[in-house]
Image: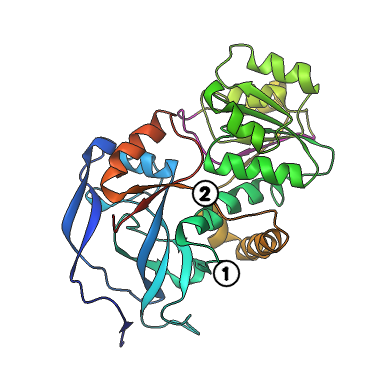
Amino acid sequence: MEINEQHTAEQWVRALVQRSHRGPEDLTLTADHRRPTPGPGEYLIRVGAAGVNFADVMQTRGTYGGGPQAPYVAGFEAAGEIVGVGPNVERPLRLGTRVVGAGPGAFSQYMTMPTAGVLPVPSGWSDAEALGLVLNWATALAALKPLGEIKTGEVVLVHAAAGGVGQAAVRLARHYGARVIATASPAKHNTVEALGADEILDSRRPDLAEAITRLTGGVDLVLESVGQATFKTSLSVTKPFTGRVIVFGAASGDATLTTHDLVFTHQVQVKGLHIGALATAAPSIYQSLLVEIDALIAHGVYTPGTPQVHPLAAGATVLRELEAGRTRGKHALDPWR
C-alpha cells in the first residue's frame, strides 16, 4: 500500500471550509487543513486551479442531491499536477502529469481525485484554461448529442447562455448546424452574441414563451438548467412529441411536472442529466463524449478556456455573485494566491 508522492512536504494546507448549510457566507479560509492522502484508485493532486460551479452554491445550502455534509472542504472541479498515487491503481499516469477532473475538496492546495475520471490537460494549455473540460463541456455535449439527438437545421433553445455550460452549448450547437435561441440577462447579451447565438432574449421578460414561439414556431431541443423560472416556458415552446427538453439544473429552484402535464398539455420528451451519474451509469456514453471533445480540441472548435481566476480567499464572494446571477462565463480559484 505504498503511496508515491512528490512536492508534498507540507502537512497543512490552505483550504476553503464550508462550516454550515447556511450558504456561501459560512465558507471560510483556513491555513491548517490537513493535506489529504490518496485512497485506493485515487491520485493526490497539487491543485493549480479550481473551477467554480453552481453546484458549489447548492452544496453550501444543502440542496445538492448527495452533496457533502458540513463541515467540508468545498469545491469538486480542479486541474493540477499528480503528486501522489494511492493503492490499487492500474497503469497510473506518471507523477508530474497535469490533469483535469473532479473529486471532493477542490478549493484547497491539495485534493484527491478518482483516477477513472481524470484527463490530461491538453498540450499547451494552463490548468485554468482546462477547467470545464470534464464538467461544462461534457455536460453541454451530452445534452446536445447522445441525449438531445441534435440534427443540422434544428432549433435549439439554451437558457443561462452566458454561464459555463451555456457558453459551451451555444458554441457546440452552432458547430452542429443548429439555429440557436439563447436567453440571458441584458447585461450579458454581448457575451452571448459573440458566441454566435442567432437570437438572444431577456431571460426575465414576461412574454418570453410568446417571443420564442414567434421567432421559431416551436423549438426542437431545449437545454434547461434554470428550473422554476423558465421550466414552464421550456415546456410550452417545445414541439409536441418530437421536441426534447434536457434538464441538468435548477438554479432558480425546483420545478414540477405531472403525468397530467405530459399527457394533456405538454407532450414532449423530458430527459434528466447529471454528468457524474452519466459517467458512472453509462461509461461507454461518457467515454464517447471524451473522444468527441478530443476531436473538437484537435479541430479548434473547443479552444482554451478563459476563466476569471480569483484568489482562494475570494471564494465566498464569487459564490455569492454566482448565486445572485451576476457572473458570466467560467470562474476559478487559485489556491496558491
Mark on residue 123? 1
Tell me what residue is drawn at x 36 percent, y 63 percent: 47
Lower position in the chain sequence, tag 1 or tag 2 = 1
Of 64 and 269, which appears nearest the observer? 64
Mark on residue 134? none
What kind of element bears circle 2? loop
53 over 258 or under it: above or below = below
> Would you say residue 149 is visible in this rendering?
no
Residue 221: name its quadrant: top right
**Where are the magenta residues, as a range?**
242-254
Residue marked by disc 2: 306
Tell me what residue is drawn at x 62 percent, y 47 percent: 140
Is the image coloured rainbow, by chain, by secondary structure, or in one colour?
rainbow
Q: Position of residue 210 (x, y in %)?
A: 70, 14
Label 1 – label 2 distance at C-alpha: 16 Å
**Residue 35 vs residue 291: left or right?**
left
